[in-house]
Image (tube, helix red, strand yellow):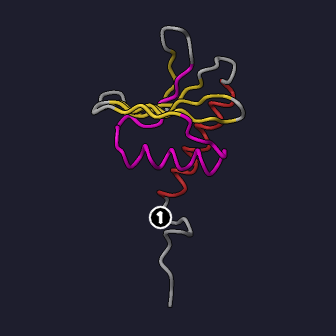
Amino acid sequence: MKEYRDKSNRLIIELSAKDSIETFLEISNKLKILWNAQVINKIESPDQRYWDFKIYDSVLVLHSDTFCGISIHFEERDKESLLRSIAEKIMIQEETQNNPLHTDHAPRGG
């Protein structure tokens, strides 16, 4: 997870350095499940994807780019702590799901 700012000083958090549709859709699903986020707009091209989600009366942008990976940011600049919280929760979920000792992935006896 990497933080940076755009030209307008808006906080952007990179969730993945690699762009993949599978990871993008997985993050989208986590936003829907964990924050009851609703997709309100989608812009897609061969190299980029922008999906806008409504979360707590704010607009969160999930962005993927072939060269820059997958990131999130809020349109509103006063949501930095919420953005960090969302990013951390997504990354914790990712680590838990990829842990071979996690109960969903543990071998079952029988």
Within-10-Å neighbours for mark 1: few <14, some 14–19, many 20+: few
Q: Nearer the viewer, residue 96 or 86?
A: 86
Placement of 21 over or under 12, stated as above or below: below
Q: Nearer the viewer, residue 69 or 95?
A: 69
Q: Nearer the viewer, residue 107 or 65?
A: 65
Q: Position of residue 91 (x, y in %)?
A: 54, 44
Q: How many marks?
A: 1
Which quarter of the figure has residue 44? top left
Q: Position of residue 79 (x, y in %)?
A: 68, 24
Q: Which residues are magenta?
A: 11-40
Q: For residue 25: magenta?
A: yes
* Position of residue 38 in the picture relative to residue 4 (left or right): right
Q: For residue 71: magenta?
A: no
Give the structural element (helix, strand or loop) at label 1: loop
At horizontal 52% and vertical 51% (from top left) the residue drawn is 95
At horizontal 55% and vertical 26% (from top left) the residue drawn is 73
Residue furthest left in the image: 46
* Position of residue 7 in the picture relative to residue 22 (left or right): right
Residue named by callout 1:
100
Q: Position of residue 64 (x, y in %)?
A: 40, 33
Q: Position of residue 8 (x, y in %)?
A: 53, 8
